[in-house]
Amino acid sequence: MKRHLPILFWVFALAASVCARAETESEVQARKTALDVAGAFTNEGFKIRDGHWCGTIKPHDHTLIAVNLYAGNQYWFSVGATEGAKKIAVSVYDESGKRITTEGYNAGEKAAAGFASANSGQYFVSVDLIDGQEGSFCLVYSYK
């Protein structure tokens, strides 16, 4: 059995490296745009959470991302998209699917939604491509 442990380790390591998806150049650019938006909130004491969500979005389509939030914290969800996106939007929903009233920011391929969480639990962030062509997007969020 001890002889098989190194082999199992390498099989696991290889499987993990194959499963890891590298970001495309377009997703890296979208992330840079999202971080530029989120950076504005750091001046107000918000901290950018480690981690981000990238992907492809199509016209008149949306992507839902589940996040766990804590009561009493304030949050800003910032999204950036590639040049093909002319107008992108971000919305937040509670665990029952009810849309949360948020403060908003929208500047074409950049958008953000902010609110203070009244309850701890799972929330859903929707990224919508309102106008433009299919492209990459990236979502990051900040809290305080």
Image (tube, rainbow, N blue to C red):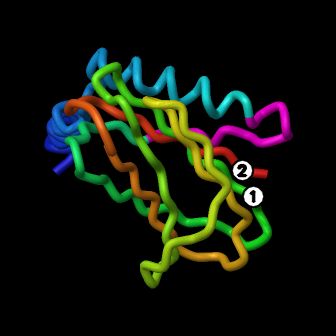
- The residue to which callout 1 is attached is 74
The picture places residue 61, in percent across and down from the top left corner, at 23, 51
Please give left or right for residue 97 compared with residue 11 in the image. Answer: right
- The magenta stretch is 41-52
Q: Residue flagged by tag 2: what amino acid is it?
A: Tyr
Is 104 on the left or on the right of 93, as rendered?
right
Q: Determine whether the residue tagged by mark 1 lies in a helix, strand or loop.
A: strand
User: Mark 1 and 2 residues: CB-CB less than 8 Å, in contact?
Assistant: yes
| Residue for badge 2 | 143
Q: Is residue 128 visible?
A: yes
Q: Residue at x 68, y 79 (%)?
A: 119
Residue 87 shown left or right of residue 119 in the figure: left
| Residue 106 image offset from top left, x and y in percent | 55, 39
Which residue occupies 25% across, 29% down?
135
The image quadrant of residue 3 is top left
Label 1 sits on what residue type?
Gln
- Residue 51 appears in the rendering: no
Q: Could you tell me which secondary element the residue under label 2 belongs to?
A: strand
As measured in the structure, the alpha-carbon distance from the residue carrying label 1 to the one carrying label 2 is 5 Å
